[in-house]
């Protein structure tokens, strides 16, 4: 078979695809791969833009390993099978009166893949999904099944949480949840300079801030989400408004605009002001995951880097100057978010508060050199690349950016000395 990721920019031809239904099935698949001399990669929803999951050996798909495995109501913790998609997990948690503290804006990923690549969301007083992980069950390269946490092989736990699939097959994840909560969402248009200049005040005043800047313009869509008490009278947005914004405008019409831009790239500077006006101001209150997550049917490629928050103005102004001075057409907005620091070894937020800047391009269009230019800019600010998004950094660069990188390599040598879980991209990232 030929496998392709969601964006269509990565393909692979595995010799076989295995869909395990238990840990023991995973053990059998690894033993058979070893006998055949094959490497093994795990694939989920394919929402990474990098070739992390690509393999010419055995591909494991964890779709049958889905659902809740255990619930600890007293500690508000759940154990979740590794293949559980976020869009399945979120309502399951809600039915228990629980929620994840933070989420990204896409919920198609499986929980193991979302954690392994560092999916993060936004909010300077909050952290990415990996920071909520309190334990994991892995099947190691030698076929052993291990459960790890801070009290049981803490080094493997810290290395394998945002682990890129390099340490074993994650079949269960234990998550520290919080009581289910609601968010008041406020979305308004703005001007780029004003939003960047007032960014620190914005992220201090609101729990979750996210803004989308439309290149070739100074227009911004600013999203501010704030947690509210149970007695807050706010209501969800009407069904007609949800359909209008999330289905018709954000997906169907936006796909048409991007197809027009593909045919005639020169019209993008005229299209983007129109796109910026399509989603007008709105305010509503709803369950946290319904506010965090949105439907993304229009396909794109993306590069995202985490930089120290103080570097955000320099990166945005540099990116704007480059776009304005080059013959490039970018119909997709640039997205900016922030999170607090965490202690996960390969997390982009390891011991650092970050601003995240994400550059997108429609999947049918050439990027015009913007991804390379963007990477050159963030290198000057110790930019750490999102593990699931486009970048070219290798082990030498990453060793400089991650203080525990040598420890990551040491743990990998211990649990996968034969590199059963390697592929070309992972070797580039972590070394041979």
Image (tube, helix red, strand yellow):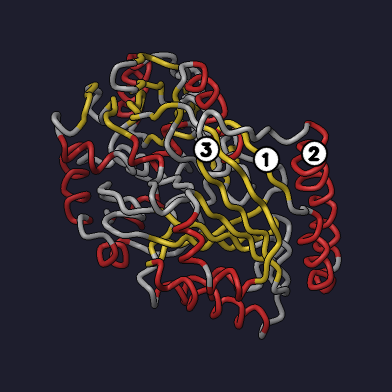
Query: Which quadrant of the figure has residue 139?
Result: top left
The x, y position of residue 245, in whole percent, is 77, 44
In which quadrant of the rendered view does residue 172 lie? top left
Which mark is drawn over residue 284?
1
In the rendering, which numbered label is found on residue 241? 2
Could you tell which of marks 1 and 2 lies nearer the N-terminus?
Answer: 2
Q: Dot 1: what SS?
A: strand
Depicted 76 relative to depicted 402: above or below: above
Outermost residue, bottom side = 325
Q: Is residue 352 left or right of residue 150?
A: right
Mark 3 = which residue?
Answer: 228
Q: Which label belongs to residue 330?
A: none
The one nearer the camera, 306 or 234, is 234
Q: Earlier in the sequence, mark 3 or mark 2?
A: 3
What is the secondary structure assignment of the residue under circle 3? strand
Using a 10 Å C-alpha cutoff, classify the residue at mark 3 as few (fewer than 14 neighbours), some (14 to 19) or many (20 or more): some
Q: CA distance from mark 3 to mark 2?
A: 22 Å
Left or right of 374? Residue 351 is left
Q: CA distance from mark 3 to mark 1?
A: 11 Å
Question: In the rendering, at what x and y percent does residue 301 appear?
Answer: 61, 55
Which one is closest to the eye, mark 1 or mark 2? 1
> Between tags 3 and 2, which lies in front?
3
Residue 160, horizontal then vertical, whole percent: 28, 39
**N-terminal of the two: label 3 or label 1?**
3
**Mark 1 touching mark 2, by CB under 8 A?**
yes
């Amino acid at each position: 078979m030929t496998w392709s990721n969601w964006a269509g920019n990565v393909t692979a031809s595995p010799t076989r695809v295995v869909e395990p239904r238990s840990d023991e099935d995973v053990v059998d698949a690894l033993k058979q791969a070893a006998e055949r001399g094959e490497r093994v990669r795990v694939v989920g929803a394919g929402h990474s833009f990098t070739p992390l999951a690509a393999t010419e050996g055995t591909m494991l798909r964890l779709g049958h390993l889905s659902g809740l495995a255990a619930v600890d109501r007293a500690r508000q913790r759940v154990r979740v099978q590794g293949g559980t998609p976020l869009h399945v997990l979120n309502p399951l948690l809600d039915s228990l009166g629980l929620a994840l503290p933070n989420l990204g804006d896409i919920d198609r990923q499986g929980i193991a893949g979302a954690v392994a690549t560092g999916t993060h969301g936004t909010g300077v007083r909050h952290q990415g999904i990996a920071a909520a992980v309190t334990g994991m069950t892995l099947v190691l390269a030698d076929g052993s099944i291990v459960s790890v946490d801070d009290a049981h092989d803490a080094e493997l736990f810290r290395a394998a949480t945002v682990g890129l699939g390099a340490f074993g097959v994650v079949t269960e994840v234990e998550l520290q949840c919080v009581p289910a909560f609601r968010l008041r969402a406020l979305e308004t248009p703005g001007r780029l300079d004003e939003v960047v200049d007032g960014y620190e005040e914005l992220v201090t005043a609101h729990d979750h801030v996210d803004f989308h800047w439309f290149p070739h313009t100074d227009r911004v869509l600013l999203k501010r989400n704030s947690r509210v008490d149970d007695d807050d009278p706010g209501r969800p947005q009407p069904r007609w408004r949800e359909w209008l914004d999330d289905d018709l405008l954000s997906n169907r019409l936006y796909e048409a605009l991007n197809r027009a831009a593909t045919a005639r790239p020169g019209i993008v500077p005229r299209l983007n002001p129109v796109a910026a006006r399509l989603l007008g101001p709105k305010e509503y209150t709803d369950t946290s995951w319904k506010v965090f997550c949105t439907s993304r049917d229009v396909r794109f490629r993306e590069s995202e880097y985490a930089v120290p928050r103080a570097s955000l103005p320099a990166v945005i102004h540099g990116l704007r100057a480059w776009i304005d001075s080059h013959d490039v057409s970018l119909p997709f907005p640039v997205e900016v978010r922030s999170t607090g620091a965490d202690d996960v070894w390969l997390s982009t937020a390891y011991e650092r508060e970050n601003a995240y800047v994400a550059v997108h391009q429609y999947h049918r269009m050439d990027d015009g050199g913007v991804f390379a230019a963007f990477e050159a800019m963030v290198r000057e600010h110790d930019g750490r690349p999102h593990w699931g998004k486009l970048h070219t950094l290798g082990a030498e660069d990453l060793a400089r950016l991650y203080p525990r990188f040598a420890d990551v390599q040491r743990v990998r040598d211990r649990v996968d000395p034969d590199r059963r879980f390697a592929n070309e991209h992972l070797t580039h990232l972590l070394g041979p």
